[in-house]
């Protein structure tokens, strides 16, 4: 039975990072501009403009404002985004 006492378990996690519990974790990617990042992942033609933008900024240091923008806007395509940024499955 779903939700029965037999199915419940205790879990203690300590000194861990990057933990994902469950298999249906999603986020949505949004953009402040006219086109959204989520649509660009579905539309391959937009990915080259994103790559150009990334390469333009590759020598600039990332600051907390940049990280906050990512935190606020990254979504259901976050794994695709991470893979396109070159992260391995272990790193993701």
Image (spheres, helix red, strand yellow):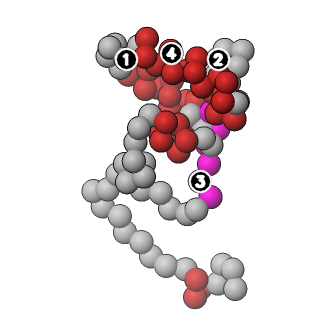
Instruction: Report which quarter residue 78 is drawn in.
Output: top right
Residue 63, magenta (yes or no): no
Above/below status of 22 relative to 41: below
Residue in the foreground of this view, choosing between 4 and 37: 37
Local SS, label 2: loop
Residue range in magenta is 24-30
Specify whether 78 is left or right of 2.
Answer: left
**Comparing marks 4 and 1, which lies closer to the viewer?**
4
Which residue is under mark 1? 58
Local SS, label 3: loop
**Comparing marks 2 and 4, which lies closer to the viewer?**
4
Instruction: Report which quarter residue 75 is drawn in.
Output: top right
Above/below status of 34 relative to 68: above
Which residue is under mark 3? 25
Residue 32: give its label. Answer: 2
Q: Earlier in the sequence, mark 4 or mark 3?
A: 3
Residue in the foreground of this view, choosing between 85 and 62: 85
Above/below status of 41 relative to 51: below
Q: CA distance from mark 3 to mark 2?
A: 23 Å
In the displayed image of the protein, which residue is found farthest to the bottom? 6
Q: Residue at x 47, y 41 (%)?
A: 83
On the question of residue 18 being in view, the answer is no
**Comparing marks 2 and 1, which lies closer to the viewer?**
1
Q: Position of residue 90 (x, y in %)?
A: 37, 54
Which residue is under mark 4? 52
Q: CA distance from mark 2 to mark 4?
A: 18 Å
Q: Earlier in the sequence, mark 3 or mark 1?
A: 3
């Amino acid at each position: 039975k779903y939700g029965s006492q037999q199915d419940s378990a205790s879990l203690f996690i300590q000194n861990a990072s990057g933990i994902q519990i469950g298999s249906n974790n999603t986020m949505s990617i949004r953009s402040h501009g006219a086109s959204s990042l989520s649509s660009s992942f579905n539309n391959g033609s937009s990915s080259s403009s994103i790559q150009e933008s990334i390469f333009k900024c590759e020598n600039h240091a990332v600051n907390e404002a940049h990280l906050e923008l990512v935190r606020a806007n990254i979504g259901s395509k976050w794994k695709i985004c991470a893979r396109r940024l070159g992260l391995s499955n272990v790193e993701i």
